[in-house]
Image (tube, grey):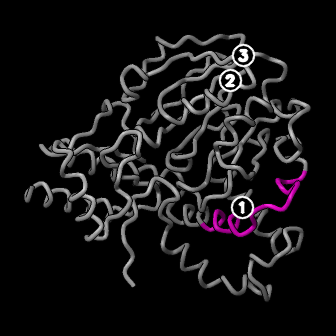
Amino acid sequence: MSRIYNFSAGPSAFPETVLKQAQQEMLEWRDSGMSIMEMSHRGKHFSIIAEELQADLRTLLAVPENYKVLFLQGGASAQFSLVPQNILNGNTKACYLNTGAWSDKAISDAKAYCDVVVSVSSESTSFTTIPGAATWNIDKQAAYLHYTSNETIHGVEFHSCPDSQGLPLVCDMSSNILSRKIDVSQYGLIYAGTQKNMGPAGVTVVIVRDDLMGHALKTVPPVFNYAEQAKHQSMLNTPPTYSWYLVGLVLKWLQEQGGVEAIEEHNISKAALLYQAIDRSTLYSNPVEIASRSRMNVPFILADESLDKPFLAAAEANGLVALKGHRLLGGMRASIYNAMPVDGVLALIAFMAEFERTH
């Protein structure tokens, strides 16, 4: 069997060593005599997995003691509604930065629970830029400032933590969590779906400062209440146990790579190689301003749109899959998350050069 290079935006490629370990442990985890999928989430064996999962993520991100780390369900999209329901704390306003499709969706969902102040929007530039902080209109009476650190569809990424001007900073970090070093203490709340850099679909990580919990609307069910889930170690109901296990394996793999600082250098190198190849080309182009380019999701356009289908067919024939751009934008998109090896990026660059030569 030969594995292809998977450039999917999510669910995305896994580290191959993680898949092999999961394969080896499918029938029996350690000396338990059973598969993880068969274990009680209250049992002693799964307790070890859950405790290691919590500890490893805290270590990798250096999470301070006054933050809770929750492993929830519903995807990051559920948090678009759950964040305001949990942390508005009687306030009627929240500020949002609109820099792409996912922040736009978060804004839309939040409007059901509060008055949304769009502090800045790059819609006028087709979400190809991140406007300078001097242009932001932050209402200091708002409950929090929300932003999306990496826009998976538009290929735009914040490369530093925004100044929230004293408001609790809330971040959807779904597509670049664990890809770069961050200071968790600068945030009030971080949330992320795991299907990009952390594991399979089905788990959502929420890292929330203690003082922001305990203020949920009375209409919020306990399973969606951060404080209630924190009291029960994210096991108020049965969690997706096998997905937790897989996330745990990815975290251990990341530690083996040298942690977040080491993987960040790896990601910088991969992205630089691909952007350099695009910028040198006359066939391919990237629409995002250089300072705002994502390290995780690289959209690119062919100068002749009629070549899109031949490009995708030839790429797949060469073992390079999931390069079709999002339906909102068209074109191409290469997602090069933590698990994408540099060899995969080099293979893509070589293919793109040959395709350009022959077309």
The answer to which of 329 and 72 lies nearer the viewer is 329
Q: Residue furthest left?
A: 358
The residue range painted magenta reads: 232-249
Residue drawn 68% across the image and 50% down it: 204
Could you say which quadrant of the image residue 65 lies in? top right
Question: What residue is shown with label 1?
Answer: 53
Who comes first in sequence, dot 2 or dot 1?
Answer: 1
Mark 3, Cα crowd under 10 Å, few <14 / some 14-19 / many 20+, is: many
Nearest to viewer (mark 2 / mark 1): 2
Which percent across, then down, holds residue 91?
79, 17
Which percent across, then down, holds residue 271?
34, 48
**Residue 248 is inside the magenta segment:** yes
The answer to which of 129 and 324 lies nearer the viewer is 324
Mark 1, Cα crowd under 10 Å, few <14 / some 14-19 / many 20+, is: many
Three-letter code, disc 2: Lys
* Quadrant where the N terminus is found in the figure: bottom left
Question: What residue is shown with label 2?
Answer: 111
Left or right: 52 as drawn, with respect to 21? right
Res 93 label: 3
Residue drawn 56% across the image and 40% down it: 182
Helix, strand or loop for disc 2 = loop
Left or right: 85 as drawn, with respect to 111? right
Query: Cα distance, mark 3 to mark 1?
Result: 35 Å
Mark 2, Cα crowd under 10 Å, few <14 / some 14-19 / many 20+, is: some
Res 178 label: none
Residue drawn 80% across the image and 85% down it: 32
Could you say which quadrant of the image residue 266 lies in? bottom left
Tally of marks: 3
